[in-house]
Amino acid sequence: MLYETQQERCEALAEYMINHNATVRQAAREYAVSKSTVHKDITVRLRHINPKLYQAVKDVLEKNKSERHLRGGEATRQKYLNSREVAIKKKPR
């Protein structure tokens, strides 16, 4: 997805994050840009481009930040469940 200006990309990223309640990682993956680019676009550039949209995406970022420990805990849980299943399958009988 190519945009003619940074402004268009900033607004597109913000709208995607708001509409899909997406994380920075998800938005970066969807738009094929780095997490750093997404973060800078929506926290620094968007503030000057579209303050109303910035405020809406800021709320999504705050929500994601407050929930990230839950996502991390679930990822760790899945990792160990999967490694346990693999160990059980490899165990000789």
Image (cartoon, grey):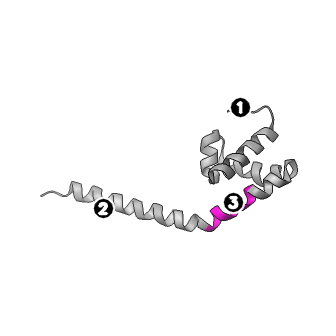
Residue assigned mark 1 = 2
Cα distance in 3D space between marks 2 and 1: 43 Å
Using the image, determine if residue 11 lies above or below residue 72. above
Instruction: Determine whether, in the image, residue 89 is placed left or right of residue 69.
Output: left
Please rate how many residues cluster around mark 3, counting C-alpha atoms within 10 Å: few if below 14, some from 14 to 19, many from 20: many
Residue where numbered disc 2 is placed? 84
Secondary structure of residue under mark 2: helix
Amino acid at dot 1: Leu
Question: At 26% across and 58% down in the image, what residue appears?
Answer: 87
Residue 86 image point, x, y percent: 28, 55
Q: Position of residue 33 (x, y in %)?
A: 66, 41
> Between marks 3 and 1, how big is the CA–CA gap?
24 Å
User: What are the residue bounds of the magenta stretch?
Assistant: 57-66
On the image, the x and y values in percent for residue 45 come to 82, 49
Of tags 2 and 1, which is closer to the observer? 1
Question: Could you tell me which secondary element the residue under label 1 belongs to?
Answer: loop
> Can residue 5 be seen at all in this image of the molecule?
yes
Q: Residue 63 in magenta?
A: yes
Which is more N-terminal, label 1 or label 3?
1
Comparing labels 3 and 2, the label whose residue is closer to the camera: 3
Question: Is the magenta region chiefly helix, strand or loop?
Answer: helix
Compared to residue 47, the image places residue 67 above or below, namely below
In terms of sequence position, does the residue under pointer 2 or pointer 1 come before the other?
A: 1
Membership of 60 in magenta stretch:
yes
